[in-house]
Amino acid sequence: MTSAFQARRLPDEADRATPSPAAALEDETFAGPAPDPVPGEGGLSLVDPQGAMQPLVSPAESLLRFITCGSVDDGKSTLIGRLLYETNAVFDDQMEALKRDSKKFGTTGEDLDFALLVDGLSAEREQGITIDVAYRYFSTGGRAFIIADTPGHEQYTRNMATGASQAELAVILVDARKGILPQTRRHSFITSLVGIKSVVVAINKMDLVDFSQERFAEIRRDYEALLPSLGFTDVSFVPISAKNGDNIATRSANTPWYDGETLLERLESVQPETFDASAEPFRLPVQWVNRPNLDFRGFTGTIVGGQIAKGDPIAVLPGDRRTTVKGVFGPNGEVEEAEAGEAITLTLADEIDVSRGDVLVAPGDTVAVGRSFTADLLWMVDRPLVAGGRFVLKLASSQTPASVRTLDGQVDIHSYEQKPANALLMNEIGKVTIAADRLIVAAPYGENRELGSFILIDPVTNETAALGIVRQPVAEAAAGSDEDAETPTAAKKGLLGRLTTLWLGEAATGSPARREAVLRSRIAGSVLVAFLALLFGMNFALIFVLALLDFALRPFLAVAFGANEPPEQGKKNDPTTVGDGAGI
């Protein structure tokens, strides 16, 4: 997700040493040819040393981003290290360091521990586990790859989800000895949740089960039983041994019964189904108002859908303010047009109010503008989530206070079925309804990744508490305001309903808890009036009538004398919401 899901880590030594096709292409682009000698000044003709070089991979479509995931100790880091080794992406000095580290930290005896090529943190090497997401780069003759090595431990599930948010394909590893584990199911569900459609199920450590065809077929049947509950459209199975290299880059003689592609062949040939952002309507979340001087005001962001050109009509959401594009500016100056994925600055023909968090769209775009939406949520902190919790919602470039209005259910990780829940614990996945304090622009995740993914931030600790996927946004025009959705107005009721609303108060009519509190307060007031009447010596019949009249008429008297004046129309009295400039 550009989103709310991305994580970054500082490059370690292995990152800097591993050759990157993207970096090589960037060098070609910006190095440029050496200048020719000035005519008339003599000297030797200079030659461009890079002139004869060819790009490692020419077509842009040849780049594949994928992740390795699965349960702990299934061999994810070892597999990536073996892929780097088999594609000659490991330098000589790295090999020497690997030999030394394998003797010190290795878990494979006298053999090289290829996991150490990826696990760079000291805690990862000492414990033999993956903790953080590690990105590695390699290429073959026909394709370039960016791999995200994700942790398998349940407590680091958040890191796995971060890596999956930007991937196009997932390699899900399964230990041939252990089969399908709960964490395998959880990672598969999260992979499906973030929209990955293509999966390679690599059944690893086949050497420890004597390359048994029966065991491979059994695990394949077990995993295929999960597929109806997942959204995968392209699934393949490969028996491998990451430690020994069986069926990684070359076909293994140990599996004569397997006639499919090797893992590397599959990665080179697969065409994963991805989001086609260029086919969507134009959408640009505003990240920054670019105001370098008095003569220029531009609105900067990354296009998340469609194309835009100079002179095109445009609308600003929320609010539907309309104008046209005066100019389109890229990194190298003004351009005629731009498309999805490009970072640009737009200038507008009219001076209209646009700020960070607004979304520029094509006029007539049906993207939802509202305050609430249903979502799938991965809870990531060790305290439980309950309905009513207050957070800061960050969706695309917008940020607003929000609450979890309802907890609609929890996904059973074993059956993928939804079941009732009162709370979500760490690493549990739930169905929720989110209510924002301000209007936001949201789209279903299947329609747009950037406008359909979000995170929830704890306003006290500033900790990312959850990440989520928008399933169904509720448009403001269709649903009305939050007050209309929760509390029917007096105009929608009959005479009795209007009197009840007036007696109880607008807020109490839609909330049983508030209604009970109002009734207790009114009864307590009537009892107090009866007690005072008793002190003044009134008889019991008059005391009873006085208390009854007080109970029935006090709210109407308060309204008649203006003591119960309602708040301004459309304004919420929320003590947890602080407006701009209202804090200390």
Image (cartoon, rainbow, N blue to C red):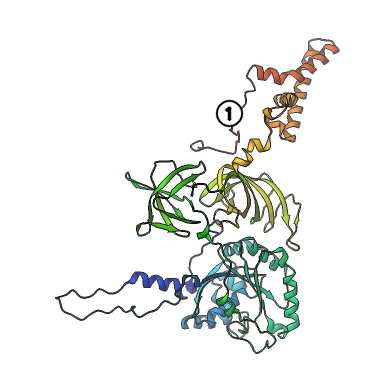
Taking depth in this image into account, of 312 and 547 the one nearest to the observer is 312
Which residue is pictured at 77% across the width and 15% down the height? 532
Question: Residue 225: horizontal and vertical position, in percent?
Answer: 75, 69
Instruction: Tell me the quarter of the picture where residue 152 sits.
Output: bottom right
Q: In the picture shown, does residue 438 fall above or below 165?
A: above
Which residue is pictured at 59% across the width and 64% down the height? 164
Q: Is residue 552 left or right of residue 404?
A: right
Q: Can residue 375 be seen by looking at this rendering?
A: yes
Question: Residue 290: horizontal and vertical position, in percent?
Answer: 39, 49
Point out the image quarter for the N terminus: bottom right
Crowd around label 1: few <14 · some 14–19 · many ≥20 (10 Å): few
Instruction: Tell me the quarter of the picture where residue 570 sits.
Output: top right
Q: Is residue 288 left or right of residue 234?
A: left
For label 1, the residue is 568
Which residue is pictured at 67% across the width and 52% down the height? 383
Q: Count every numbered label the image shows and give the total.
A: 1
The amino acid marked with disc number 1 is: Glu
Q: Residue furthest bottom?
A: 253
Question: Residue 165: horizontal and vertical position, in percent?
Answer: 58, 62
Q: In the picture shown, does residue 349 fall above or below 44?
A: above
